[in-house]
Image (cartoon, helix red, strand yellow):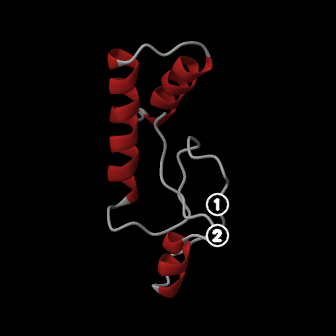
Amino acid sequence: MVGLLQAVPGTKLHARLHQQGRLIGHTTGDNVDDTTNFVSRTNRETLRDGYRRRCTISIRQVRITGGSVRFCASFARRMAPAP
């Protein structure tokens, strides 16, 4: 499974990011919805591009069926640059 990291309340990561003032909003609990709830040291576009690339590689390298393939394909289309 490929997903973006989210800082879940009650974890050391959440506590550290809270202490650093890097939390933004709440976790959705869905690590494949292309969101995070903290400010990363990597800019958001770079994160999304890397996620999209990883998702595409996963489809090619790993035998994935059903919903996962549809999700990754849908995500790649949504993240494609506008013409």
Three-letter amino acid code of the residue under disc 2: Pro
Q: Provide the residue designation for mark 1.
A: 27
Label whose residue precedes the other's in the sequence (1 or 2): 2
Asked whether the residues under the numbered discs 1 and 2 touch, taking CB atoms below 8 Å apart as contact, a structural biologist would say yes
Q: Is residue 61 left or right of residue 6?
A: left
Front-most of residues 14 and 71 = 14
Above-or-below relation of 74 to 4: above
- Label 2: how many Cα within 10 Å (few below 14, some 14–19, many 20+): few
Percent of width and height locating residue 75: 51, 31
Q: Residue at x 57, y 71 (%)?
A: 24
> Which secondary structure, mark 1?
loop
> Which secondary structure, mark 2?
loop
In the figure, residue 50 lies in which quadrant? Answer: top left
Front-most of residues 77 and 56 = 56
Q: Residue at x 45, y 29 (%)?
A: 76
Above-or-below relation of 45 to 82: below
Q: Residue at x 34, y 61 (%)?
A: 43
Q: Residue at x 49, y 33 (%)?
A: 1
Three-letter amino acid code of the residue under disc 1: Thr
- Label 1: how many Cα within 10 Å (few below 14, some 14–19, many 20+): some
Quarter placement of the C terminus: top left
Percent of width and height locating residue 5: 48, 54
Residue 9 marker: 2
